[in-house]
């Protein structure tokens, strides 16, 4: 009995000490949700850096209403329940009024609903699900919707290859399936045929059977998207199975950077000639800052969205001359015309439902181990 | 359906899986529990090999051998620290199994603490595929199949030609009697852990070479390895190889199968091609596992 | 007071997990069924109740009951192989069946909306409760459920039925020789456990109001196991204490970041390492857990 | 009461039971003897349903019972004890006794929950009976100890008590007196005989001690190599040449 | 000084003691039989002598050396060999491999010689050397088990019910073999349940009951003691 009483006491002490520190100082706090562990952990460092860079920059420029900005980063573990823990902790314990970041739509959606119901502003960073638009007026998005991305990639692939038989390969999660749906709709609208439509489970090490299936019906063009780990394995295996010969069957990818950022460094030869969309370039300013801080190139473009989100929140708060989320919300609609962002082509104007309407995607190709404009 | 390619993919995957399955089955055979941490040992070894290869610049082959050696000792160390104590207090196999689950979680996250979650690769160039009978295979894959095969033969010889192997079989048959034959079973168990972990490392490094390497890899491969082991009959090393082959073949074949002819019954119905959704691929090994357990609980090859 | 809100949230989650841990303890601690697929009950309960309400407009009470029934039926299905399988083989089979349930939820998009998850799960009795009091109301609701389940399970385990289960756990052959249909008993135990798990799933779904297959990965089962190992098997207080300890530990490490100079990735890795080590240490040095199984004494 | 016809059981090439036929009459005590490894326990295991037979038939009260699972056979009133007594580790002696009681209402989860008064009433009755039996077996001071902590002899007694709780029509006892101290052993035999007389139960006993056998058995069967080599009254058996040769080897 | 001395040993499984203070001793060149009913603790005594069980009190002394807490494999190296009751061979190993296991601690030359001796003593083993042990009949299995135990050239041989499950004829053969081993200078300790045959070849005997010494004396005394005869010999 004594032992467990002691343990409980220690745990509660930890909690109380945590509370004590968390509720200190006179700062403007922004909650940053980052998938530090779990399936998307590979990008965590970049995503956090995006947030931290913006924080430093805002503070160097005088902060918000004279207060320094503090971005409190919490781990979502890429799972909904701990994501909820993180958001609750930020809102209830750290008393943040504004949240940003997020990665998987599946993790961020319940948080968005929570924010809406509590009157907390949530400027969603990388997630792209159209469902965010329906949540309510406290939710904004920094990335372009799948709807736009789907059309963009189909336009690119159909126009560029001039072929009509498509094989699709998308990951089996909210992001992948939404993109797949938009892609299929757009392909049908363009009169193209989908011969095979492969969905794959994340975090496996062998995708040969899926690739075999993808090519079983002899598609003429491939459209597919991955995360870094799966992109690397799939590219390697496709190459080794003779499926990655872009002069025979061209490959298009709606998410070049997140799919191939690792692969392009490790196995550039395999990916030579793969085309796709890049939500970049992140402004030179951002890339340089990132390089200066981390001493390397960013892996993912999504981090720039986190950066933009923090800057825009700070600008809006200053513009509204208030830290009230509702006022910041209204101000966001007013400042979006003025802000040249670092992500998705720089245009950060919101349209109905608080989503990005004008983001541009650059058509890119992999050449000599680099993603370059096509 | 491209049978030749399916066969080659099957062989490569089976070679990797069976190296891992052998270690698992050996531990089960001697200590009678399913070691959930087994693939994590393998990944730990693969990460050691990465350190030797990429950071110390050692030849990859040497790096893997060295890593297998180091990890073998880690396996012994963990056994001495954890499993031996449990054996001493006469814990049930189920307790050992749950403990190994705890060990797996601790080890996996410790690796993440040390090496971060980022993916890693060895210093080997991208492989150009060769064409054989219309199927593609890379030299590395040929190497994997050969190493797999050689390791299996070595394992067979070890079990049947060396005193240590015979002693292992004796302990597996009847450990009390083995003790009465002056066989120091604790010493043999130590060596067994060394061997199981080392074999795991070879399998793990081959997966790392052929696919990717990251600390969570152990968790992502444990189910197929378990499946192969049980499929062949736990405690039987040849069963483990057969199980690995069967599983690898099923995974590759089932996704390629077109069920339409089965349902159309020679023109009775007219359905287009019906294929199992690739989203269910991870379920294949589970389903096979459950079906085998239901109808032949001892696996394909009955033990002894 | 926002901190109070956070504590209420935490307690609610602890409550839901302690239901799951109690259900698992009923299987492991009382019947000796090593279930590594406990998360399946959680998943089935959550999906059934929320889909019935969201898609079919069924009243919440009915949805809860159907969810519990369905997950009980799944318990029944899971119990069938115990007839021919040894306990460790069965354990691995349950691990597989837990994953299969998740994969079905992920792939049968026509029913479950696949990876997008079930949106728009309404709050129970939303109109009757003032908004500010709602979290407290739900917490009380969960606590009421725990008390009910606690009484329900204690009554069962203290009855001749529970005695039979304990006998199966300790000496199955003896039980057979005394004319007990052990297969039927296991089946009944799994149905009971499934029902409780289904209740926890429903409570979770209607609290979070959004569920997706990502909620139901094998790691959840592992956490439940950690709870009953730390708390102690063979009694339900242990399950609750275990849930409190593990959940508090999980959350408190979020605050530890303020003091320990470690990155968040390392922090999270460290947290899981510690949970793993905790399990090992408990099994090695205090196998009965924090709270021992109570001896039933007659006078 | 029990009729066994041409029973066979093989383990691989070993014939553990080879064409064994025997009978146990209503309210009689029958002994089964034979050297180690002669198939006595195997016979019990087959009759009580723990092993599957390879041939032959088993009838109990005129009903065929071979092929039934052990619990069904036990329910029909044919119960057994084990050579190495089984004792659930974390259940007290009293719980063990109550466990065995027959047709308990509370064994069904529904009635356990919703018919508590009646369940408690039957528990009370069972409890009284259990205490009485424990008294007789001299275990009552241990009633709240874990069964796993008992000594081998005490476990034997407990297993007898459990079987009596079941109120079966016939009991198979596998070496009931091994490891039990001699004074208690006499009492035990006395108890068995009384039970047989008062309640008209049949007993089928594996024993090593000839003394026990000749004291209480009406009839004895002798097994060797899975074959029945003799049957008769204890006196007859002790005179039987073949038995002396096989079992008492050279005496 | 006796070869083996067991002094007032208390031992058992887990928390349950089976032996409550048992003492026996064997001189060199003796055959000693321990009899007693099932559950008397005979096998427990052997397991305690061999070191599978560590006694909670008491001592086991072999060749004037305290070996109470030594693990079984070291006891074998010291010169005690043990043939368990029924599971006394490795069924999935071949006969030759079984013999190799028997002589596990020997170097290869000694091993080869040992195997040759075993083959010449039991030609049937030689004929079936590459077959698995599970194919052997009961008597052959017992011979193999004894040959395995002899591979270590022990000074003391512990036999747990050597005639269990054997037909009288085969049992006679086994006992003849035991006699001839004894003539080679090996001391032998036998457990028997129904023990006429083994008492007949023994010098002395012990009667164990309920985990305690009940009686000891020369084999003839035991065989002719009417009380023991009635209580333990089934006569």
Image (cartoon, coloured by chain):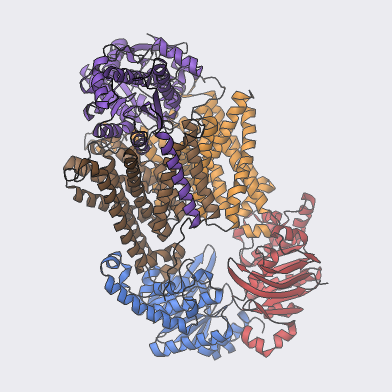
Q: Position of residue D49 (x, y in %)?
A: 42, 69
Which residue appears farthest toward the top when viewing the image? Answer: A374
| Letter of the brown chain | C
Viewer-proximal residue, C274 or A234? C274
Residue at 51 percent across and 47 percent down: it is C278
| Letter of the orange chain | B
Does the rendering let one see residue C222? no
| Letter of the red chain | E
> Looking at the picture, does residue D179 appear above or below residue E59?
below
Q: Colour of chain D?
A: blue
Residue E153, quarter of the rendered image = bottom right
Viewer-proximal residue, A50 or E180? A50
Q: Position of residue B114 (x, y in %)?
A: 55, 32
Viewer-proximal residue, D50 or C173? C173
Which quadrant does the N terminus of chain B fall into? Answer: top left
Does the rendering let one see residue A193? yes
Q: Position of residue D230 (x, y in %)?
A: 53, 83
Which residue appears farthest toward the right when viewing the image? Answer: E1
Is E191 positioned to the left or the right of A5 in the image? right
Query: Total of numbered circles in the picture?
Result: 0
> Looking at the picture, does residue B261 appear above or below residue A59?
below
Q: Position of residue C54 (x, y in %)?
A: 20, 40
| Letter of the purple chain | A
Residue A41, quarter of the rendered image = top left
């Amino acid at each position: 009995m004594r032992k467990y009483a002691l343990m409980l006491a220690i745990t509660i002490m930890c909690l109380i000490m945590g509370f004590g520190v968390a509720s200190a100082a006179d700062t403007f706090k922004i909650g940053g949700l980052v998938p530090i562990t779990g399936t998307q952990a590979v990008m965590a460092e970049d995503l956090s850096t995006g947030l931290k860079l913006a924080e430093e920059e805002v503070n160097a420029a005088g902060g918000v209403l004279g207060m320094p900005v503090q971005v409190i980063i919490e781990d979502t573990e890429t799972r909904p329940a701990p994501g909820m823990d993180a958001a609750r902790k930020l809102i209830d314990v750290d008393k943040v009024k504004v949240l940003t970041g997020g990665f998987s739509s599946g993790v961020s959606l319940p948080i968005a609903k929570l924010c809406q119901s509590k009157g907390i502003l949530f400027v969603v960073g990388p997630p792209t699900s159209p469902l965010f638009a329906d949540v309510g007026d406290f939710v904004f998005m920094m990335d372009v919707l799948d709807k736009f991305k789907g059309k963009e990639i189909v336009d690119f692939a159909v126009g560029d290859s001039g072929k009509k038989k498509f094989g699709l390969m998308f990951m089996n999660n909210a992001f992948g399936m939404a993109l797949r749906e938009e892609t299929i709709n757009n392909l049908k609208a363009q009169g193209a045929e989908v011969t095979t439509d492969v969905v794959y489970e994340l975090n496996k090490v062998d995708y040969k059977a899926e690739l075999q299936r993808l090519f079983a019906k002899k598609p003429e063009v491939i459209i597919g998207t991955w995360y870094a780990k799966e992109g690397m394995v799939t590219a390697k295996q496709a190459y080794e199975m003779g499926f990655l010969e872009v002069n025979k069957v061209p490959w298009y990818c709606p998410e070049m950077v997140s799919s191939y950022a690792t692969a392009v460094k490790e196995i550039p030869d395999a990916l030579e000639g793969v085309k796709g969309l890049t939500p970049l370039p992140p402004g030179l300013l951002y890339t340089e800052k990132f390089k200066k801080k981390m001493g390397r190139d960013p892996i993912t473009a999504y981090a720039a969205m986190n950066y933009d989100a923090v800057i825009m929140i700070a600008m809006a708060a200053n513009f509204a001359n208030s830290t009230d989320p509702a006022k910041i919300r209204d101000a966001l609609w007013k400042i979006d015309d003025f802000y040249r962002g670092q992500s998705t082509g720089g245009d950060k104007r919101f349209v109905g439902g608080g989503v990005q309407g004008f983001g541009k995607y650059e058509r890119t190709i992999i050449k000599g181990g680099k993603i370059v404009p096509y | 359906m491209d049978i030749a390619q399916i066969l080659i993919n099957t062989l490569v995957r089976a070679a990797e899986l069976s190296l891992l399955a052998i270690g698992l089955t050996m531990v089960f055979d001697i200590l009678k529990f399913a070691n959930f941490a087994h693939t994590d040992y393998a990944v730990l070894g693969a990460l050691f090999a990465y350190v030797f290869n990429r950071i110390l610049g050692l030849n990859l082959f040497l790096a893997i051998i060295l890593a297998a050696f180091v990890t073998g000792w880690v396996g012994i160390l963990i056994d001495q620290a954890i499993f031996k104590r449990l054996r001493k207090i006469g814990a049930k196999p189920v307790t050992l199994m749950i403990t190994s689950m705890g060990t797996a979680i601790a080890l996996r996250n410790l690796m993440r603490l040390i090496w971060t979650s980022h993916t890693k690769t060895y210093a080997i160039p991208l492989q150009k595929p060769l064409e054989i009978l219309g199927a593609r295979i890379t030299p590395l894959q040929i190497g994997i199949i050969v190493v797999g095969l050689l390791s299996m033969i070595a394992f067979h010889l070890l079990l049947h030609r060396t005193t240590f192997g015979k002693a292992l079989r004796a302990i597996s048959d009847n450990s009390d009697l083995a003790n009465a034959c002056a066989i120091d079973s604790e010493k043999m168990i130590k060596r067994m852990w060394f061997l199981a972990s080392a074999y795991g490392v070879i399998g793990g490094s081959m997966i790392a070479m052929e696919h990717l390497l990251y600390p969570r890899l152990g968790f992502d491969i444990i189910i197929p390895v378990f499946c192969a082991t049980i499929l062949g009959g736990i405690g039987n090393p040849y069963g483990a190889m057969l199980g690995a082959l069967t599983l690898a073949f099923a995974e590759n074949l089932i996704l390629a199968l077109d069920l339409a002819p089965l349902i159309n019954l020679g023109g009775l119905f007219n359905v287009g091609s019906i294929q199992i959704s690739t989203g269910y691929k991870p379920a294949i090994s589970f389903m096979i596992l459950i079906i085998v357990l239901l109808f032949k609980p001892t696996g394909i090859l009955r033990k002894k | 007071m926002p901190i109070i809100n956070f504590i209420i949230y935490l307690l609610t989650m602890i409550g839901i997990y302690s239901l799951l841990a109690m259900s698992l303890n009923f299987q492991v601690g009382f019947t000796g069924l090593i279930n590594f697929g406990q998360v399946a009950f959680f998943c089935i309960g959550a999906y059934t109740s929320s889909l019935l309400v969201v898609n079919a407009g069924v009243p919440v009470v009915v949805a809860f009951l159907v969810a519990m029934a369905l997950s009980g039926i799944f318990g029944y299905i899971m119990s069938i192989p115990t007839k021919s399988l040894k306990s460790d083989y069965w354990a691995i089979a349950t691990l597989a069946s837990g994953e299969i349930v998740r994969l079905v939820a992920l792939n049968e998009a026509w029913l479950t909306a696949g990876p997008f998850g079930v949106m728009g799960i309404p709050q129970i009795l939303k109109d009757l409760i003032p908004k500010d009091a709602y979290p407290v109301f739900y917490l009380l609701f969960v606590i009421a459920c725990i008390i009910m389940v606690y009484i329900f399970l204690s009554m069962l385990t203290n009855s001749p039925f529970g005695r039979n289960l304990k006998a199966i756990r300790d000496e199955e052959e003896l039980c057979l020789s005394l004319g007990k249909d052990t297969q039927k008993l296991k089946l009944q135990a799994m149905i009971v456990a499934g029902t409780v798990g289904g209740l926890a799933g429903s409570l979770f779904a209607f609290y979070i109001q959004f569920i997706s297959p990502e909620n139901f990965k094998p790691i959840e089962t592992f956490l439940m196991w950690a709870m009953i190992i730390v708390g102690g098997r063979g009694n339900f207080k242990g399950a609750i204490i275990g849930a409190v300890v593990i959940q508090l530990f999980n959350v408190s490490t979020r605050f530890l970041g303020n003091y320990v100079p470690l990155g968040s990735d390392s922090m999270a890795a460290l947290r899981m390492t510690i949970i793993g080590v905790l399990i090992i240490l408990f099994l090695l040095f205090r196998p009965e857990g924090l709270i021992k199984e109570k001896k039933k004494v007659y006078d | 009461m029990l009729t066994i016809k041409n029973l066979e059981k093989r383990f691989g090439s070993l014939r553990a039971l080879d064409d064994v036929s025997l009978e146990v009459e209503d309210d009689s005590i029958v002994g089964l003897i034979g050297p180690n490894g002669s198939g006595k326990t195997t016979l019990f295991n087959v009759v009580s349903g723990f092993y599957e037979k390879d041939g032959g038939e088993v009838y109990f009260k005129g009903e065929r019972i071979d092929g039934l699972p052990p619990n069904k056979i036990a329910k029909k009133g044919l119960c057994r004890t084990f050579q190495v007594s089984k004792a659930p580790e974390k259940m007290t002696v009293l719980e063990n006794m109550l466990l065995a009681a027959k047709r308990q209402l509370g064994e069904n989860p529904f009635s356990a929950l919703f018919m508590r008064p009646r369940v408690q009433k039957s528990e009370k009755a069972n409890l009284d009976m259990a205490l009485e039996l424990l008294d007789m077996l001299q275990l009552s001071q241990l009633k709240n100890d874990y069964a796993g902590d008992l000594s081998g002899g005490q476990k034997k007694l407990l297993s007898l008590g459990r079987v009596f709780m079941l109120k079966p029509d016939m009991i198979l006892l596998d070496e009931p007196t091994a490891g039990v101290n001699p004074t208690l052993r006499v009492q035990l035999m006395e108890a068995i005989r009384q039970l047989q007389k008062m309640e008209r139960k049949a007993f089928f006993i594996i024993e090593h001690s000839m003394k026990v056998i000749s004291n209480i058995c009406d009839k004895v069967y002798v097994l060797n190599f899975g074959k029945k080599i003799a049957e008769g009254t204890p006196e007859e058996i002790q005179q039987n040449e073949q038995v002396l040769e096989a079992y008492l080897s050279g005496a | 000084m006796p070869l083996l001395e067991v002094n007032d040993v208390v031992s058992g499984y887990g928390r349950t003691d089976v032996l409550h203070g048992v003492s026996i001793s064997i001189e060199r060149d003796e055959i000693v039989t321990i009899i007693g009913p099932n559950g008397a603790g005979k096998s427990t005594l052997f397991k305690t002598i061999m070191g599978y069980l560590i006694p909670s009190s008491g001592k086991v002394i072999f060749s004037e050396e305290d070996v109470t807490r030594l693990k079984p494999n070291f006891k074998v190296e010291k010169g005690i060999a043990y043939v368990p009751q029924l599971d006394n061979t490795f069924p999935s190993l071949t006969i030759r491999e079984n013999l190799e296991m028997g002589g596990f601690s020997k170097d290869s030359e000694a091993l080869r010689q040992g195997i040759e001796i075993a083959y010449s003593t039991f030609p049937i083993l030689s004929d079936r050397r590459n077959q698995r042990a599970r194919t052997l009949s009961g008597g052959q299995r017992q011979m193999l088990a004894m040959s395995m135990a002899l591979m270590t050239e022990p000074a003391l041989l512990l036999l747990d019910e050597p005639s269990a499950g054997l037909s009288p004829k085969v049992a006679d053969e086994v006992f003849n073999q035991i006699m001839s081993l004894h003539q080679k200078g090996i001391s032998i300790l036998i457990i028997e349940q129904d023990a006429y045959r083994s008492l007949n070849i023994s010098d002395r005997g012990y009667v164990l009951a309920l985990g305690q010494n009940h009686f000891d004396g020369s084999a003839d005394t035991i065989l002719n003691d009417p009380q023991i005869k009635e209580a333990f010999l089934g006569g």
